[in-house]
Amino acid sequence: MSIPRVDLLIVRGVVLTVDADRRIFANGAIAIKGNRIEAVGPSAEIERLYTATRTIDADGGVVHPGFIDCHVHLSQHLGRGTIPDIWPEEREHEQWFPYWTHMNEEDAACSAMLACLEMLRNGTTAFADNGGRFQGELNAFVARRVGLRAMVGEVCWDIPPYPEVAIGDTRMCLQRLERLVAALPFTEDSRVWSGVSLAGMGYCSDALVAGAKAIARNAGVTLDLHQSFGSADTQAYRRHAGGATASAHLERLGVLDDQTQLVHMIHTDPSEIEILLRTGTNVIHCPAASTRVAMGVSHVGHFPEMVDAGVNVALGSDSGNYSDFFDIGRQAYLTATIHREARGRMPVISAEQVIEMATINGARALGIADRTGSLEPGKMADLVIHSKSRPEWHPGLDPVNSLIYSAQSVSVDTVIVDGNICLENGRATRVNETSEYRDIDRSARALYERMGYRIPHRWPVVE
């Protein structure tokens, strides 16, 4: 009897499956055939059952499902680090507005490439983009080049902050959303597809929100919108809702269910937790985006209470000049720690819970939990292998604690998406990083020249 052959075997890894039983194989292996996981188990057993075209020896490194970043803005990454950290959050439009209006498609592609390479290097295998400067196909193209799994969107608002960034009235916004879901459909084998994304937070009329949800339901995809980020936008939205909370108002509109994700949700009322739980709505926690600009996430947000109640809470990085980095490992560390500091007790949210938030919970929020988010036979082969040759992994007696509190993403060595090795030995395999970074820096300098924006350094810079 011949031994079944697979395309790839990963052996001798500490495998965090995040399966239904949350099993960890101390000396584990994963067999991959095509783009799917064929088997997971002890190395001795898997190596006895399968032969492979290629074998990767994890050499004791931790292997886990790829991180899922449920909220990013690819088009803003080229401008990160250019807003002084002494500016209050409401001044960000002094940089954002000229950046947005002077950006061209080459700039947007460079921005997306920078963001995708950063996510890949940090162990992210899937992400959701809320909408770029240009049509969603641009960001989809870049995600495909790098090899990531992605749900992309369009920028849509019918109550824009400036007339210059408007894309039309409610009808035109809905047409834009319908066009993209038709152009990038969500099918059984989709690696890049369109969600339905909105600005939210008072920038969208009730008619647009309800219409967008109808499009999302018809296409079978996630509705993605910002909500309740700062106290000012939350209070304004409550006035719009006739005094109701955002969750209560959105429930009245009929848009809350397990295929809706609300991003931020910092300034919430405790009464909203029951609504979110009952409707199955997903909440995307972006801790760095709040701590960077002092929105109050640690002492105002009810994220521990949401997690305790059973609300599906996942993680997001947001954008340049807010969190400034696309790294779910670091977001997970913040999530596990800042709420303890604010409440003065342990653990509030545990290391195990934040790993779930970074993987399987994110997959649920994007509607792909049947495909990815855990390492199980039949699921897509989306996974990360860490190098053990880093001090952060030693002595490594508890792989879960070590991943969240010491290693995070610094030791990511290999990233596999859809069965393809997209990062190997810490370098992207599908694009030339050196030339991409050169193009990215050149594009950013040219964009800021066109903007006429001078970064206000507080220390003297000598050319």
Image (cartoon, grey):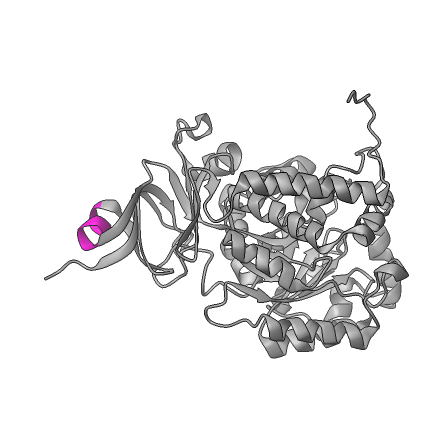
Can you give x and y, in whole percent of width and height, for residue 189 in the image?
46, 68
Is residue 178 at least partly visible in the picture? yes
Predominant secondary structure, magenta span:
helix
Residue 316 colored in magenta in the image:
no
Where's the N terminus, which quadrant? Answer: bottom left
Of the pair 325 and 447, the residue shown nearer to us = 447
Can you give x and y, in whole percent of width and height, for residue 306 in the image?
63, 54
Which range of residues does the magenta coloring cover? 44-50
**Residue at 43% from the left image edge and 55% from the top image edge:** 374
Q: Is residue 113 left or right of residue 30?
A: right
**Residue at 22% from the left image edge and 58% from the top image edge:** 5
Occupied quadrant, residue 213: bottom right
Can you give x and y, in whole percent of width and height, for residue 318 in the image?
68, 49
- Against 116, residue 386 (above or below) is above
Q: Is residue 424 left or right of residue 162?
A: left
**Residue at 49% from the left image edge and 56% from the top image edge:** 360
Occupied quadrant, residue 257: bottom right
Is residue 327 at least partly visible in the picture? no
Q: Is residue 303 left or right of residue 35?
A: right
Can you give x and y, in whole percent of width and height, for residue 258 in the image?
59, 68
Q: Is residue 230 left or right of residue 297?
A: right
The tally of labels here is 0
- Against 375, residue 394 (above or below) is above
Occupied quadrant, residue 290: top right
**Residue at 82% from the left image edge and 56% from the top image edge:** 234
Q: Tell which residue pokes out farthest to the left in this image.
A: 1
Where's the C terminus, which quadrant? Answer: top right
Of the pair 275 and 143, the residue shown nearer to us = 143
